[in-house]
């Protein structure tokens, strides 16, 4: 009976999974169908615009060429009319002279005849008819303004759709996810010398495998990529995966997208648990600050909300006066806020923990202190850290501690033991936790210098832990383990960075 139930349960699970795949495919097909209809209307509209533009150019050319013909006609007409006018006047003058000469032949008086003959000779010499060119100034030929459209007609008749570029292929073996950056590499299935550029599309997701249409973020694009590789840098890895796809574009059209790929981009993302932090640490939305008033007036605001903005949690400085260990009667009288069955830290434990437990894997986050922060600690602790316990003073917490109160001290602390660190206090501290490997390391983010490493065996889930007094911290999460840290871990595993006095098997 039990075996049959297990078999039936497996069948049900398989069917449910298959139904989910079919549903996702139906949504994809419907989305594609809408895209076909929308894109078809779009390209028809673009085709109309192209032909309207072509008609407009032809109309402009026709008008310009017609104007040229009319101007040539007007010029030739004017020249010929001027020549006709000159010829008419010359002819009229010549006929008048011819008539005078004819009449002179009938003169009988020799003296008058000689006088008339001399006048005729002088007038003939000056007659316009003898200076005229008896050839038209311009030709009636207009063939130089004729157009042969045979070549253009052939080109237009040969007009066809521009070949759509084929979809590129993303080369998974050449893709790289490291240092909060993703490098995507692709290639064309065959050489295409008409490719002008590529468009990369990406989006964050928490689903492995093929992209889903429903309940997914919109694609973001990077346009005009000239090469076949691109690196997205400065990302906050607050999702488990990212989808990528690429399309090729020529001068006029973009091709289909490549088959999408999904790359794992998981990193530790946590906020600070304001509901259990010390009453002197005020938590409001995306920041935490030292509050010398004990949080009066803020009780209704402190809810340990998740930061939905930049991905950083800031503990802002509020007061630089006071003593390192102020006692407050209001702490014990105030009703504790409970989150996950944890009371607020109290007494001298000015502590706030992360709200996400580390149970396996390798993780990394960074901490930046304000310049005049008097005292702070950065580390990890088990969930059962007592509300009166201080980081590094129990066998369930590990940290490095910086004290700027009277003189600067820099030490690694665990189980109420301290080891002074011979290093300059960095502006930014990187925390690397290898839960399975039993290592907790601290780095100078700027110089990549290893500050200290605890080597132990973690037997319970860990929470990032912070202590702050009269100052502030900024915690940056969603970071992958940097390549430099991975390299240093490999080379430093055999180094004496861990003090034997602080190394233990955590219980």
Image (tube, rainbow, N blue to C red):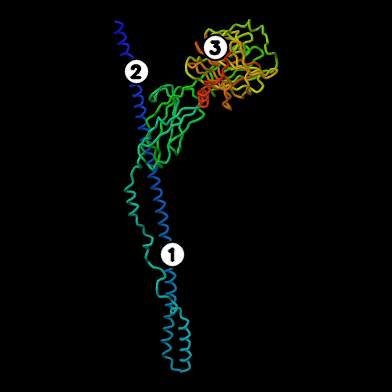
Mark carried by residue 504: 3
Residue at 48% in and 85% down: 122
Q: Quick check: can you spot residue 304?
A: no
In the rendered structure, which disc, 3 or 1, sits on the residue that comes first in sequence? 1
Element type at marker 3?
Answer: loop
**Whether label 3 touches label 1, CB < 8 Å:** no
Mark carried by residue 75: 1
On the image, the x and y values in percent for residue 56 come to 40, 48
Say above or below: 258 vs 435: below
Element type at marker 2?
Answer: helix
Instruction: State how far apart marks 3 and 1 are (Cα).
Output: 108 Å
On the image, the x and y values in percent for residue 452 come to 58, 20
In the rendered structure, which disc, 2 or 1, sits on the residue that comes first in sequence? 2
Residue marked by disc 2: 17
Mark carried by residue 58: none
On the image, the x and y values in percent for residue 121 come to 46, 86
Q: Quick check: can you spot residue 360?
A: yes
């Amino acid at each position: 009976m039990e075996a049959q139930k297990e078999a039936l349960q497996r069948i049900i699970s398989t069917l449910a999974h298959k139904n989910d795949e079919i549903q996702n495919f139906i949504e994809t097909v419907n989305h594609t169908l809408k895209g076909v209809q929308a894109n078809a209307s779009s390209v028809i509209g673009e085709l109309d615009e192209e032909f309207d533009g072509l008609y407009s150019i032809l109309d402009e050319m026709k008008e310009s060429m017609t104007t040229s013909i009319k101007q040539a006609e007007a010029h030739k007409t004017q020249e010929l009319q001027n020549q006709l006018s000159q010829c008419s006047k010359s002819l009229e003058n010549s006929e008048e002279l011819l008539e005078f000469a004819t009449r002179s032949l009938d003169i009988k008086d020799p003296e008058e005849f000689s006088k008339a003959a001399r006048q005729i000779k002088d007038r003939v010499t000056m007659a316009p008819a003898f200076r005229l060119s008896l050839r038209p100034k311009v030709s009636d030929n207009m063939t130089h303004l004729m157009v042969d459209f045979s070549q253009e007609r052939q080109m237009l008749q040969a007009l066809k759709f521009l070949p759509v570029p084929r979809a590129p292929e993303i080369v998974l073996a050449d893709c790289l996810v490291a240092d909060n950056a993703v490098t995507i590499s692709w290639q064309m299935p065959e050489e295409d010398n008409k490719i002008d550029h590529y468009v990369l599309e990406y989006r964050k997701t928490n689903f492995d495998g093929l992209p889903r249409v429903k309940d997914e973020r919109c694609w973001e694009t990077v346009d005009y990529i000239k090469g076949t590789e691109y690196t997205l840098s400065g990302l906050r890895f607050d999702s488990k995966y990212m989808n990528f796809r690429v399309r090729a574009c020529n001068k006029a059209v973009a091709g289909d997208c490549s088959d999408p790929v999904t790359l794992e981009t998981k990193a530790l993302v946590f906020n600070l648990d304001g509901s259990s932090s010390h009453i002197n640490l005020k938590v409001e939305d995306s920041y935490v600050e030292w509050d010398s008033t004990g949080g009066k007036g803020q009780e209704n605001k402190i809810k340990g909300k998740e930061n939905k903005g930049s991905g950083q949690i800031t503990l802002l400085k509020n007061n630089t006066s006071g003593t390192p260990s102020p006692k407050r009667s209001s702490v014990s009288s105030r009703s504790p806020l409970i989150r996950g069955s944890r009371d607020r830290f109290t007494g001298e434990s000015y502590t706030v923990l992360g709200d996400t437990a580390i149970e396996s894997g390798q993780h990394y986050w960074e901490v930046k202190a304000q310049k005049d922060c008097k005292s702070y600690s950065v580390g990890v602790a088990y969930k059962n850290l007592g509300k009166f316990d201080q980081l590094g003073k129990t066998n369930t917490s590990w940290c490095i501690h910086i004290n700027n109160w009277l003189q600067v001290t820099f030490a690694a602390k665990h189980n109420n033991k301290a080891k002074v660190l011979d290093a300059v206090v960095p502006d930014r501290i990187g925390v690397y936790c290898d839960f399975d490997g039993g290592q907790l390391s601290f780095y100078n983010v700027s110089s990549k210098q290893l500050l200290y490493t605890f080597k132990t065996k973690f037997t319970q889930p860990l929470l990032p832990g912070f202590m702050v007094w009269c100052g502030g911290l900024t915690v940056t999460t969603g970071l992958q383990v940097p390549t430099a840290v991975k390299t240093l871990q490999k080379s430093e595993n055999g180094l004496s960075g861990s003090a034997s006095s602080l190394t233990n098997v955590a219980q």
